[in-house]
Amino acid sequence: EIVLTQTPATLSLSPGERVTLSCRASQSVNNHLAWYQQKPGQPPRLLMYDASNRATGIPARFSGSGSGTDFTLTISSLEPEDFAVYYCQQRSSWRTFGQGTKVEVK
Amino acid sequence: EVQVDQSGGGLVQPGGSLRLSCAVSGFTFTNNWMAWIRLAPGKGLEFVANIQPSGGVKNYVGSVKGRFTISRDNAKSSLFLQLDNLRAEDTAVYYCARDFGGGYFEHWGQGMLVTVSS
């Protein structure tokens, strides 16, 4: 099973700051990685797929990069609605998720 | 507009059964793989099962094989998950979603809580 490790577990930030979230795979997943955002009481929302493709309706401040084992989700300038938990997920071998990074208000 | 409405869930004793349902509108259900994903308390998301558009191919995570059954009714644009022989570790919020691009998930339902406890 491919294990996805997300760091850090929690980030404390202020609106307007730049955010960089990391996801590392235990073996190569090529570019077969997605990112999701989940807010309390809501289902996850797909943000990015195939590492760098924004899903429909996702604002341009979200961007993704990486291939192989190391991936990054960047939010260029945090908006108040971006405080949430972010998960990465791979589809290269079965489907597994990372444990999530919580972006909280500082 | 895409709508994914879930029903079912609730409290059940260990060894019991439940059926989850998911009604879809706003995209062509019959052309799409569909999936169930769960979020257990204090844990991350876990893929549970998915099903081919025709219903002929089904995949399950190892921990639920032989206990859970995924199915679909294309005439009613509905997805189901039959949960049998439930265990405490199956306690989670269960989501249905469209499985696209070979294994990504979009158009998630609102989630239904399944609690397995005596």
Image (cartoon, helix red, strand yellow):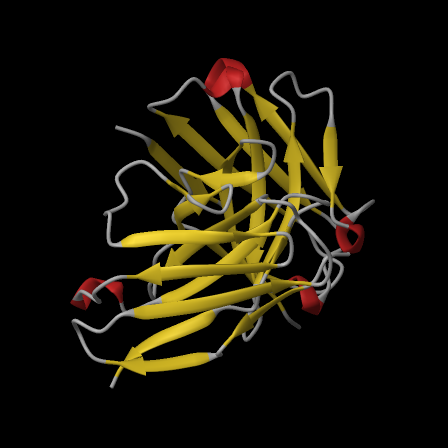
Q: What residue sits 31% from the left and 78% below the top?
A: A104
Residue A69 spot, x, y in % from top left: 64, 58
Residue B16 spot, x, y in % from top left: 71, 56
From this viewpoint, is residue B89 visible?
A: yes
Residue A21 spot, x, y in % from top left: 43, 68
Q: Quadrant of residue A10?
A: bottom left
Q: Is residue A52 above or below residue B24?
A: below
Looking at the image, residue A103 sits to the left or right of residue B44; the answer is: left
Looking at the image, residue A89 sits to the left or right of residue B69; the answer is: left
Q: Nearer the viewer, residue B64 or A60?
A: A60
Q: Nearer the viewer, residue A11 or B18?
A: A11
Looking at the image, residue B40 sits to the left or right of residue A63; the answer is: right
Count the marks: how many? Answer: 0
Q: Is residue B54 above or below residue A78?
A: above
From this viewpoint, is residue A44 visible?
A: no
Q: Is residue A37 above or below residue B50?
A: below
Kindly give the residue lying farthest to the top in the view shown.
Answer: B75
Kindly give the residue lying farthest to the bottom in the view shown.
Answer: A106
Residue B85 spot, x, y in % from top left: 77, 54
Q: Nearer the viewer, residue A23 or B77?
A: A23
Q: Nearer the viewer, residue A14 or B110?
A: A14
Q: What residue sits 76% from the left and 59% below the top?
A: B15
Looking at the image, residue B24 sits to the left or right of residue B61; the answer is: left
Look at the image and tell me in which quarter the N terminus of chain A lies: bottom right
Look at the image and tell me in which quarter the C terminus of chain A lies: bottom left
Q: What residue sits 73% from the left and 45% below the top?
A: A93
